[in-house]
Amino acid sequence: MEEMRFLRREHLPHIWCVGCGHGIVLGAVIRAMDRAGVDQDRTVVVSGIGCSSRAVGYLNMDALHTTHGRALAFATGVKLARPDLRVAVLAGDGDLAAIGGNHLIHAARRNIGITTVCFNNGIYGMTSGQYSPLTPAGYRTTTSPFGHLERDFDLCRLVQAAGATYVARSTVYHVHQTVTYVERALAHDGFSFVEVFSPCPTYFGRHNRMGDPVTMMKWLHDSAVQAGQAARMTPEELRGRVVLGEFHRTTEVPEYARSYREMIARLAEGGDQGAR
Amino acid sequence: MITAGIILAEAAVMAGLNAVQTQSYGPESRGGATRAEVVIADGEIDYPKVTNADVVLVLTSEAYRRYGNKLKQGGLLVADSDLVGEVQAGPYRIVRVPITRIAREELGREIVANIVALGVLAALSQVVPMEALERAVMGRVPKGSEELNRRALRCGEAAGRQAQVKEAHEA
Amino acid sequence: MSQPRLMQGNEACVEGALEAGLQFFAGYPITPSTEIAEMLAERLPRAGGVFIQMEDEIASMAAVIGASLAGMRAMTATSGPGFSLKQENLGYAALTETPCVVVNVQRVGPSTGMPTSPAQGDVMQSRWGTHGDHPVVVLSPSSVMETYVLTAKAFAVADELRVPVILLTDEITGHMRERVVLPDPGTLPRPHRPLEGAAPPDIPPMVHFGEGRRVLVTGLYRDSTGFWSESPEEADRLVRRLAGKVESRQEQLTMVDRWHLDDAQVVVVAYGCVARSAQRAMRLARERGHRVGMLRLACLWPFPGHEIEALAERADRIVVPEMNLGQMVGEVERAVRGRCKVIGYSRVDTELIRPEELLPVLEGV
């Protein structure tokens, strides 16, 4: 129970619904923080707007609860001003992949040292159930009442292609796996990204005949395929399944905030490469 | 042309005068219609734009058509003799100098036409001392092009004096 | 005093910011403010600070707030379209009381307009651009030298009051080059943020990230502990305190130039680049025997309503020339409340108002 020190317990209970997976993600995050040896006086957690964004308010450390979609842009300012601090972004799928999609790919491209955990429930919960870029095709939401026509993002592939140097996916059903990935992401020096599938029985579930939490958990369990196993499956077999695993991990790309500090140091020593 | 305006204003400041330089330009990075305005005074300059110009320098017919009417009575119009067509006679002094041709043929680089023009202007108007103008040019041009620009200024100055002599002859 | 030199308005903004201790700049390229970003990209890292070109205008504003909360003095610069995009996060800075400076080098609008041409159309947006009642301070320079002074001042006010300060300049003032003589480095007072034990009662002390204080910064309404709150009483207290901390300091923040106001029958109220035209027009009118005076506003918001009120008691007419269809004139009318005539003069054809065209308006022809 060492990880409980990371919570502002006086502000519990949290605002999340019965059966929501976000509490499990937050639990995994604090366990991972404990394992990674996070110093809560030298860590800033940043979020945007949405159900999951409230998570930072329950964390007993510096917390920045910002505007919709912009958590990574705010976090970039924090990290560049104080590269010595650990910076983590906790955000939802709508926040990260829709309104904040531009910031997501650019933070990944810079390889700035921010750990991002995406609480992916495939829906806008706070506004009561509209489709997000991660709502799978065919599912019903309040804004796709006849079944969703759009395809969803593969967020991990997107972020990896954009330049992230640690990329992994898990679900709240696979909670130990989630803790491991978040721990590695926190220890990673560069832009690290963990997508965690989290059930929203209240909105996603009710619109799709999975209104009770247990059914949604079972759905997560049944849809999930580990990456090793997925490699041996055909695209047909993989349709509608969620592939879990560590997809990418490299230490070859320099972390951005450190690169900037190194440039400042070079300039201070009289190096003026590139200047007129 | 905007660079020339900046250099002229800078020369005025170096010579202990007050100066304001403004400009208007379009979206083009190169070419397009640009206008540089310079106000030079001993004292405070309130309104920063040129209303009645003592000197108007035009390198194209288009520029003349647009800005020729800014010239005040008794003012000086300097026009490129090759590139500016008919100019209207009036109660002002008109001097025509082949500014762009000098840059192209004598200096081998059309891009220094603006510096040639500054030399012409300084020789004809004495608005700023040549010494200050040369210092200002040296401070603003890219490294490695100082000699070319110094020559451009000299060529312009010489062309200006020559035009002055010709003017005196004709008068 | 430094040597006299020719300096561009945007360059003076950079010099003023660095003199005030700027440490962080995030921006996005936009005419006519880009020179500020370009100069800082080179100057800031040399001074140990950080420059970043973000992926968009919204991100630039966000990064500035993040850096400020992490303890750096931070600024961004933009023009109309970018200023529109920054509004939501500007409101976030106002609510969270995050000191920052936003430079808006105004160009014409709405939309893309003529991107290289001047206007003063963002006066009301600078005051009311973000949603909700919020505190903001807007400074507006009329010269290159004043751009330097007011940029530095913007940081002092932002830090002291914990508010976003907008430096509202324009294409003319930003791109104009003028002779300036800068004060010696180190002679301007350094801005400082209110610290614990030394903060006024209506401004909470500033606590930065990484100090071990475990602060929560949120855009939600909050209670006195800083945690989000849904209490109507807390909401009322917060919104009124935020607005009040600027309004109650209006007199201290007001910066005006007064010319010939003691005998003026006609008073011109002007700001920004147009103040230069108005000043000349006033001089010309006085040479012709007309009793014309002028009030130039260097701080637009908070608006010096009392000053205008007092003028309205004495003058017959107040003339407000602007490069918009009449924004500040409405504010002047609100203060005058019918005590004298108020005449707006507008120009929106991208050309700076000329003194000669103002002359008949001042002379009442």
Image (cartoon, coloured by chain):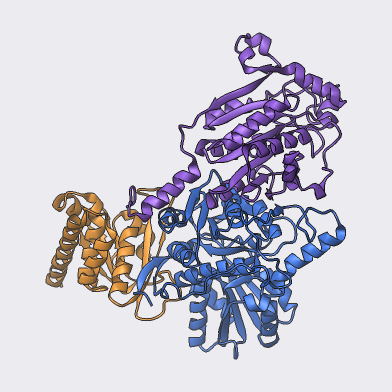
Chain colours: A purple, B orange, C blue
Q: Position of residue C220 (x, y in %)?
A: 76, 52
Q: Residue shown at 72%/75% (left/top)? A: C248
Kindly identify the residue that appears in the image at 56 percent across and 71 percent down.
C271
Residue A36 falls left or right of residue A10: left
Would you place residue A255 above or below residue C269 in this image? above
Residue C287 placement, left or right of A240: left
Q: Residue at x 66, y 17 (%)?
A: A226
Q: How many marks?
A: 0
Query: Is residue A167 among what the camera can see?
Result: yes
Left or right for A18, reference C44: right
Residue A95 appears in view = no
Residue A230 location, x and y as percent?
63, 13
Instruction: Return the residue found at the far bottom.
Output: C263
Q: Residue at position x 27%, y 75% from top?
A: B15
Q: Is residue C161 above or below residue A62?
A: below
Q: Is residue C271 above or below residue C229?
A: below
Horizontal relation, residue A203 to residue A59: left or right: right
Where does the image place residue C42, in percent across and percent down from the top left?
40, 54
Residue B30 is situated, as x and y percent measured from the top left of the image, at: 35, 48
User: Which quadrant of the figure contains the N terminus of chain A?
Assistant: top right
Q: Nearer the viewer, residue A233 or C329?
A: A233
Between B159 and C54, which is closer to the camera in this rendering?
Answer: C54
